[in-house]
């Protein structure tokens, strides 16, 4: 059995090691972190907002360039992704089935590789 002094020293060492590990983890890049903006997918031309049926910009479902509210196609599913490749700084708004605003993208270029189309019924590019 350890004496009181050795137990206190050991406890301090464990606490210090834990604190050091916490600092290292908080400053290390996360493998799950997504880059804020990646290069546009090949099937999303400049000037368009593109919606994909699958994550990671797979299976293009629509690409809209016009600046009025447009319904998204049936069959977009619950998952998906989007890429905003409009003029720099332009946002797109997403609306639910009651035409209530539920999300506004960051200005172009911007994207979400892992989103959900489930609550979205229409989008509008804010040109």
Image (cartoon, grey):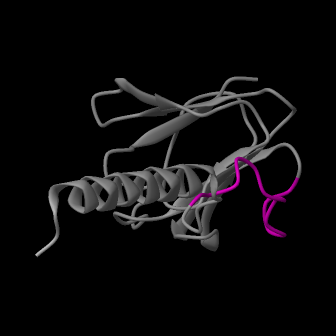
> Is residue 49 shown above or below 114?
above
- Verify whether residue 39 appears in magenta: yes
Q: Which residue is depicted at the point 75% across and 50% down? A: 37
Q: Would residue 87 be found to the left or right of residue 110 on screen?
A: right
In terms of image quadrants, where is residue 126? top right
How far across and how far down the image is residue 103, in percent? Answer: 46, 31
In terms of image quadrants, where is residue 47? top right
Q: Would residue 36 be found to the left or right of residue 96 on screen?
A: right
How far across and how far down the image is residue 36, in percent? Answer: 70, 47
Instruction: Tell me where the magenta segment starts and ends, as one range.
Output: 33-45
How far across and how far down the image is residue 123, in percent? Answer: 53, 37
Q: Quadrant of the C terminus?
A: top right
Q: Would residue 42 be found to the left or right of residue 19 on screen?
A: right
Q: Which residue is depicted at the point 64% across and 68% down? A: 57
Q: Which residue is depicted at the point 55% across and 60% down? A: 81
Q: Quadrant of the N terminus?
A: bottom left
Classified by dominant secondary structure, the portion drawn in magenta counts as loop
Of residues 81 and 34, the one drawn nearer to the viewer in this rendering: 34
């Amino acid at each position: 059995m350890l004496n009181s002094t050795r137990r206190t020293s050991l406890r301090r060492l464990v606490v210090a090691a834990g604190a050091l590990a916490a600092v290292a983890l908080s400053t290390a890049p996360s493998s799950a972190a997504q880059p804020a903006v990646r290069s546009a997918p090949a099937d999303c031309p400049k000037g368009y907002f593109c919606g994909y049926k699958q994550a990671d910009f797979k299976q293009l479902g629509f690409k809209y360039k016009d600046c009025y509210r447009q319904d998204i196609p049936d069959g977009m599913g619950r998952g998906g992704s989007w890429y905003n490749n409009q003029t720099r700084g332009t946002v797109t708004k997403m609306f639910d089935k009651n035409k209530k605003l539920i999300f506004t993208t960051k200005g172009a270029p911007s994207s979400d590789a892992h989103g959900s189309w489930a609550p979205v019924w229409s989008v509008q590019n804010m040109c």
